[in-house]
Image: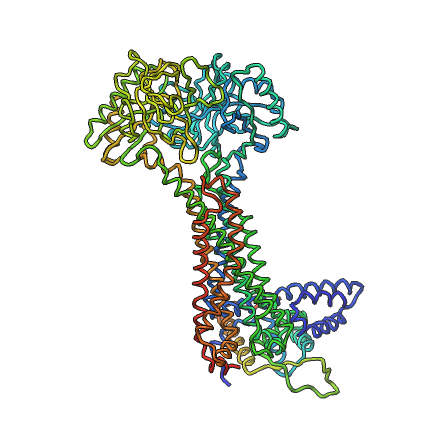
């Protein structure tokens, strides 16, 4: 499904928390705490989303249509019915991709100027 | 965990309801990760760091949404939004402006040290509450008073400033050496007076403005010499910019000194006493003490002080009762407007809230939280009211400078009042509370009723709330009729004043002043040469029919009386024999068109070598020789026996609002050298068909020829001199008229809004009535009757309040009764017609309701 280019561009650049949440739900539906854990694991503990930041982001992303509450739920044995699971929408995927190309472009430009990431 | 749950309350309720449980769960899980002895502290810190910024962010998100929603909703109903904003702006703006001026004048911030301890000391006689002090009384009172740490005297005058450019007439004041220290102000440059200055009496302190304009802000001005009334004075200091005393016209200050014989004089009242209260002394104790001292002085000099008592006022309270009353009337009018604005805003928002009851019920039924709706409504009402308040601030800011003419000149403060932010904020707050209250509460009740609101098919807004709105409209009608009637009373008073005959004709008369300086012009013969030289020149000009010199113009110079006594009688000391004294040259009466009823005019031959004569006014004749031929009668006046040679019509010397004494006119030459200084003629009057622009250069030339050092001041057509009499009243009245017009507009808008809403709510009812056979004329008259009844409900109490207001300001009404039937009928008729206009459109709309359409909606 193609999306309105202006709509997507209007959301860029994405706040880092939003981008991370999109990444967290890009491969499977996750509930809130699972998102926090996923982000923490992927960043090697560098980014630990607070609960407030997470749910404010989720609220906004729901309104923007980047994610939806998942209808499918895990097997009953694994499910906690009080939890809500979130899955990425096609718009969410499109926006994440657009953000990626924006960042890639930026890095290419920086490289072209001879800048390299700091090595420690 | 309890801490975290408590902190969660910081989030908006809607957010909490949606995510509260999950937030808590995530928090618990994360806390489980935390290890170590400080775990609790760490987790509390984490909780705070998490909740506070995010809760603030969540609130901000909602506010943004609400503002977006509100501005969209208001753009859909621009008429409503603009009306509400305009109404609030008028209410807040009118109050901000009126109270800015009123507090500025009634509670002035005086530029003196500890101004609350500053008092002015006056004499009081049966006719005058505040009469200037005589030098002898000043001396005795000062010596006796223990309530004051210091007491000084001053006298406002004007001097001719010569040397360096065109000679100039400037306002001045003479201070005793104590006055500057009493006021607690030091000089900006140089110093103020010390005792040694009074010995020579040739020191002058300049005002900041005069230093800027006349001396080019020269910092070396101290020590320089200036010429005042032809005498050299040494500049010893320059005062700071905000120092103005005893009035705004004072441009320089000289020392006030008394000759030995002055200090025995108890009849020459020309000093203003100013004093500073001792620590511990109060205004009341000072008044009591001076009353005792005045009685003691009276025992010593029973004859001279027969009717003299003492009077003490705070410097800050120095404002005439008339001015005070007018300002209070202005504040009252502004409060009426505020009341109207509140009623109107309440009505507008109430109607809007009711009409949205269904929408809100639907949203509640669909699960919108009460809190979320409340926020939405508060945001909407607040946005409207705050826009109005901001517009009101701007309105007040723009209008305050236009109200400067309401600041009397006698106050020692700058003329432009600053905006009184406190008054503005209070007015803003009142309107905001009313507006938000009426915009939110009823809608919330709709939300509580929930689905019931949907069931009645949207015909809500009846019953109790209809009554609330009816009362609001009645209040509006009442407030506007009060304003209309009081304004009408003041207008009638103004017209009465303006229609009074001053006793002279103002058309085609130009006036100007050449105040002759002493001691150069001490000799009447020297003065006469000056007058003759100028007058012969002026009278020779084309289109000039007559010209004359006189002591002072009527109304511009209101006082100046002398006791008249008949030969063989002793003088009365109670002022009952006072007559207005004016020295005049020939042609004064013809120039002023004062009718000469008997005898002759003053003539050039009435000099010191001829018998001393006088021309008196009609009322003077009635008083002293009621049934005799006045011509040839003699009386004692101004140090000589005078014979009456002519009788003229009476003139309103003291203006339109006060009774005047009988008048006596004396020839300019029949006075001894150095006597009766105060009455030296200085005003030139010229009757001519040419305008001032043509005459003035010629007159200047004649004055320069007569005396190159002589300045000309106070150039004005006689009509303007008379108009300034009523100018401050006219200015006040214009403001009140504007407020009354606003009130009328607001009341009309209110009635129209109320009835329009009632009609739209009752369409089905009207439809049923029409379907059952009601004529459209019946429907029309039903709504008209309803509107007019509302109007009547406001008119009746309004007339009563207006009558009370009229009584309170009776002093301003110059004889118009507060219950003046013409004014009341006119006010009621005007307000009634406004009500009718407000009713017409909605009533016609009601009469044209098509029953088939109205009922189909059911």
| Left/right of residue A118 with respect to residue B46 in the rendered view | left
Q: Report x, y in % for residue B23.
A: 70, 72
Q: Is residue B675 above or below residue A79?
A: above
Quarter of the image for residue B211 reads: top left
Q: Report x, y in % for residue B126.
A: 52, 26
User: Does residue A119 appear in this view?
Assistant: no
* Residue lying furthest front: B627
Identify the image quadrant of the N terminus of chain B: bottom right
| Left/right of residue B436 with respect to residue B620 in the rendered view | right
Q: Residue at x 25, y 36 (%)?
A: B691
* Residue lying furthest bottom: A75
Q: What's the image's color scheme?
A: rainbow
Q: Report x, y in % for residue B318.
A: 52, 33
User: Does residue B786 appear in this view?
Assistant: yes
Q: Is residue B812 above or below residue B197?
A: below
Q: Is residue B377 above or below residue B136?
A: below
* Residue lying furthest right: B37
| Left/right of residue A41 with respect to residue B662 in the rendered view | right
Q: Report x, y in % for residue B494.
A: 41, 42
Q: Give the camera-side residue of B600 and B27.
A: B600
Quarter of the image for residue B606 reads: top left
Q: Is residue B563 above or below residue B372?
A: above
Q: Give the camera-side residue of B631 and B531.
A: B631
């Amino acid at each position: 499904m193609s999306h309105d280019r202006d709509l997507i561009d209007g959301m860029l650049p994405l706040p880092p928390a939003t981008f991370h949440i999109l990444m967290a739900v890009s491969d499977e539906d996750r509930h809130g705490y699972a998102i926090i854990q996923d982000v923490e694991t992927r960043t090697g503990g560098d980014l630990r989303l607070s609960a407030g930041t997470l749910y404010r982001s989720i609220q906004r992303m729901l309104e923007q249509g980047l994610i939806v509450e998942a209808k499918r739920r895990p097997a009953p044995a694994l499910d906690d019915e009080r939890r809500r699971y979130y899955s990425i929408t096609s718009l969410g995927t499109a926006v994440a991709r657009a953000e990626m190309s924006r960042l890639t472009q930026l890095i290419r430009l920086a490289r072209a100027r001879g800048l390299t990431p700091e090595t420690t | 965990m309890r801490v975290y749950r408590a902190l969660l309350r910081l989030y908006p309720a809607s957010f909490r309801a949606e995510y509260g449980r999950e937030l808590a769960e995530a928090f618990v899980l994360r806390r489980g990760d935390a290890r170590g002895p400080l775990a609790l502290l760490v987790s509390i810190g984490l909780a705070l760091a998490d909740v506070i910024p995010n809760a603030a962010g969540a609130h901000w998100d909602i506010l943004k949404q609400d503002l977006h929603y509100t501005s969209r909703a208001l753009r859909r109903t621009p008429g409503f939004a603009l009306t509400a904003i305009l109404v609030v702006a008028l209410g807040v703006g009118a109050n901000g402006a009126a109270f800015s001026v009123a507090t500025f004048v009634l509670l002035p911030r005086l530029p003196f040290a500890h101004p609350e301890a500053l008092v002015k000391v006056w004499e009081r006689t049966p006719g005058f509450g505040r009469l200037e002090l005589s030098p002898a009384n000043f001396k005795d009172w000062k010596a006796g008073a223990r309530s004051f740490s210091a007491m000084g005297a001053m006298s406002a005058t004007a001097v001719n400033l010569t040397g360096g450019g065109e000679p100039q007439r400037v306002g001045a004041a003479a201070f005793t050496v104590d006055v500057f220290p009493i006021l607690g102000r030091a000089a900006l440059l140089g110093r103020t007076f010390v005792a040694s200055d009074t010995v020579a009496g040739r020191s002058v302190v300049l005002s900041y403005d005069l230093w800027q304009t006349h001396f080019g802000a020269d910092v070396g001005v101290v020590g320089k010499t200036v010429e005042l009334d032809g005498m050299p004075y040494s500049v010893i200091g320059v005062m700071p910019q905000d120092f103005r005393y005893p009035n705004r016209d004072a441009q320089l200050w000289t020392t006030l000194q008394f000759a030995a014989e002055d200090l025995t004089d108890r009849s020459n009242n020309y000093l203003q006493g100013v004093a500073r209260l001792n620590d511990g002394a109060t205004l009341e104790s000072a008044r009591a003490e001076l009353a005792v001292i005045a009685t003691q002085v009276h025992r010593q000099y029973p004859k001279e002080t027969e009717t003299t008592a003492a009077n003490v006022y705070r410097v800050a309270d120095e404002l005439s009762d008339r001015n005070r009353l007018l300002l209070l009337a202005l504040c009252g009018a502004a409060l009426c407007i505020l009341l109207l604005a509140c009623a109107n805003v309440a009505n507008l928002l109430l109607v809007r809230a009711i009409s949205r009851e269904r929408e809100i019920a639907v949203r509640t039924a669909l699960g919108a939280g009460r809190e979320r709706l409340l926020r939405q409504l508060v945001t909407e009402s607040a946005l409207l009211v705050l826009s109005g308040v901001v517009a009101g601030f701007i309105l007040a800011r723009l209008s305050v400078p236009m109200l400067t003419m309401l600041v009397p000149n006698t106050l020692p403060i700058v003329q432009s009042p600053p905006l009184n932010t406190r008054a503005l904020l209070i007015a803003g707050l009142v309107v905001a509370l009313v507006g938000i209250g009426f915009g939110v509460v009823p809608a919330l009740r709709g939300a509580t009723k929930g689905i019931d609101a949907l069931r009645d098919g949207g015909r809500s807004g009846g019953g109790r709330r209809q009554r609330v709105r009816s009362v609001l409209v009645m209040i509006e009608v009442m407030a506007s009729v009060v304003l209309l009637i009081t304004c009408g009373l003041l207008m009638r008073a103004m017209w009465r004043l303006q229609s009074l005959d001053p006793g002279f004709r103002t058309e085609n008369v130009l006036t100007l002043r050449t105040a002759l300086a002493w001691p150069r012009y001490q000799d009447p013969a020297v003065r006469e040469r000056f007058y003759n030289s100028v007058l012969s020149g002026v009278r020779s000009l084309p289109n000039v029919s007559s010209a004359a010199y006189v002591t002072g113009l009527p109304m511009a110079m209101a006082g100046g009386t002398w006791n008249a006594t008949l030969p063989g009688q002793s003088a009365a000391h109670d002022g009952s024999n006072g007559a207005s004294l004016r020295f005049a040259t020939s042609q004064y009466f013809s120039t002023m068109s004062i009718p000469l009823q008997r005898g002759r005019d003053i003539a050039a031959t009435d000099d010191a070598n001829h018998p001393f004569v006088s021309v008196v006014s009609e009322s003077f004749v009635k008083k002293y020789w009621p049934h005799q031929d006045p011509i040839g009668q003699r009386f004692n006046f101004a140090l000589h026996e005078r014979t009456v040679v002519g009788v003229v019509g009476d003139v309103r010397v003291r203006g339109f609002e006060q009774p005047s004494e009988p008048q006596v006119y004396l020839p300019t030459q029949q006075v001894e050298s150095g006597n009766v200084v105060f009455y030296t003629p200085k005003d030139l009057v010229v009757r001519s068909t040419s305008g001032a622009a043509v005459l003035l250069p010629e007159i200047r030339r004649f004055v320069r020829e007569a005396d190159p050092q002589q300045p000309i001041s106070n150039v004005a057509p006689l009509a303007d001199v008379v108009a300034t009499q009523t100018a401050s009243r006219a200015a006040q009245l214009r403001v009140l008229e504007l407020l009354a017009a606003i009130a009328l507009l607001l009341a009309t808008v209110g009635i129209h809004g109320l009835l329009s809403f009632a009609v739209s709510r009752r369409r089905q009812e009207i439809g049923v009535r029409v379907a059952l056979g009601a004529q459209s004329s019946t429907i029309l008259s039903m709504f008209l009757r309803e509107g007019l009844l509302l109007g009547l409900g406001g008119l009746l109490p309004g007339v009563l309040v207006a009558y009370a207001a009229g009584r309170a300001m009776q002093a301003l009404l110059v004889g118009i009764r507060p219950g003046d039937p013409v004014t009341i009928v006119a006010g009621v008729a005007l307000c009634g017609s406004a009500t009718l206009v407000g009713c017409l459109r909605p009533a016609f709309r009601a009469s044209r309701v098509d029953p088939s359409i109205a009922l189909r909606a059911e």
